[in-house]
Amino acid sequence: MKNTGGIALALVLLGTAALAQAPSGSIDDHIAAARTAAGLDYRATFVNLCLPTPPRGAGPGPAGRGAAAAPPTPDRATWYAPPFKVFDNLYWLGTRQHSSWVLQTSAGLIIIDTNFAWATGPEIIEGMNTLGLNPSDIKYVIISHAHGDHDQGAAELQKRYGAQVVMGAPDWDATLQRPASAAGGVPKRDVTVGPEGRTLKLGDVSVQIVATPGHTPGTLSYVFPVKDRGRTLMVAYSGGTLTGAFGTDAARWDEYIASQRKIAKVAADAGASVLLSNHSEYDGAYTKARLIAAPRQPGEDHPFIVGTDGVQRYFTVMAECAMASKLRAGAK
Ligand SMILES: [Zn+2]
């Protein structure tokens, strides 16, 4: 009996020690919270952000990484996707992997993210022509962050159509250091968004641009209205995702986590019920876009609507996975 008491005391002490080490939750706690928030909707986001192995593909690195030598255009059969009208005033011009969007206003068009340089012609320009949109009407190209899979088309759209390129301040600085030979060329600085963010108004549409540093120092996220058969819905657009390169840089983890809370709050205040990303694996854009044309069954809503709770759960996945990964990395 005496021994049992000793074991019980030891267990209490062990528990106290564990709590003292991780007062704000353990790695497992954060992963569990992220898994619950992800549900079946955001499994790829959960896997890519919460599991220890860095995912393949375009990951975080210094902004301006598009300066890397231009890769050859991959086999079209592996990436081409036709364009789709997604909302009354929002169109998808993505490849199967990466998304570009066109937001239509009463005073012209806003492109949200481009893609690799090799996709500008077949996806953005030809896609707009297919949808009856005129590329000459592009007034702004908003770049969520300066990685080649989202920004290599910016310079061409600026040069050909006089579109103004919008980017976060640190990502502009990185972009302007690229050599002229960089894939897609180097855009000239037009609109710079600082840490305070800004509202970009064009005609009847205002895009709230929120600085969400983390994935890159100048990552931007957005909240803006779209219409579904005349009904206004608010979109939350997540501008940067992966955290694989943060290592033991605690400040960078904390900045990323704070950014997810910041955009989640702006999205909640706006009543955002649609979640968009620049990668189809996170928002299902390629799959969902093809469903738009299908007749809706009674009670069935627009396929991109995840509800205000669904939008919040997305940013919870990002923040909780980052908290788990920060602990795992030993960043203090
Ligand atoms: Zn990136």
Image (cartoon, rainbow, N blue to C red):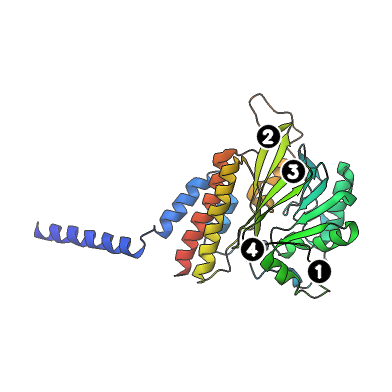
Compared with 275, 141 (above or below) is below
Asked if marks 1 and 2 touch (Cβ < 8 Å), the reply is no
Mark 2, residue position = 302
Of residues 271 and 298, the one drawn nearer to the viewer in this rendering: 271
Determine the secondary structure under disc 4: loop
Q: Give the structural element (helix, strand or loop) at label 1.
A: loop
**Residue 193 image-quadrant placement:** bottom right
Q: Residue at x 54, y 63 (%)?
A: 255
Q: Amino acid at mark 1?
A: Val
Q: Amino acid at mark 2?
A: His
Q: Would residue 286 be visible to someone looking at this image?
A: no
Q: Nearer the viewer, mark 3 or mark 2?
A: 3
Q: Name the residue tied to disc 4.
A: 56
Q: In front of the other: label 3 or label 4?
A: 3
Residues under numbered marks 3 and 2 in contact, where contact means CB atoms less than 8 Å apart:
no
Quadrant position of ligand 1: bottom right
Could you tell me how far apart the alpha carbons at marks 3 and 2 are, in whole angstroms?
21 Å
Q: Position of residue 57 (x, y in %)?
A: 67, 63
Q: Earlier in the sequence, mark 4 or mark 2?
A: 4
Residue under pointer 1: 186
The residue carrying pointer 4 sits among few (fewer than 14), some (14 to 19) or many (20 or more) residues within 10 Å by Cα, namely: few
Task: Please determine whether, in this image, residue 66 is positioned above or below residue 157.
Answer: below
- Residue type, label 4: Arg
Q: Which mark is residue 205?
A: 3
Which residue is rendered at x = 58% and y = 53% of the image?
Answer: 45
Q: Nearer the viewer, mark 1 or mark 2?
A: 1
Looking at the rendered image, the disc whose residue lies closer to the viewer, 1 or 3, is: 3
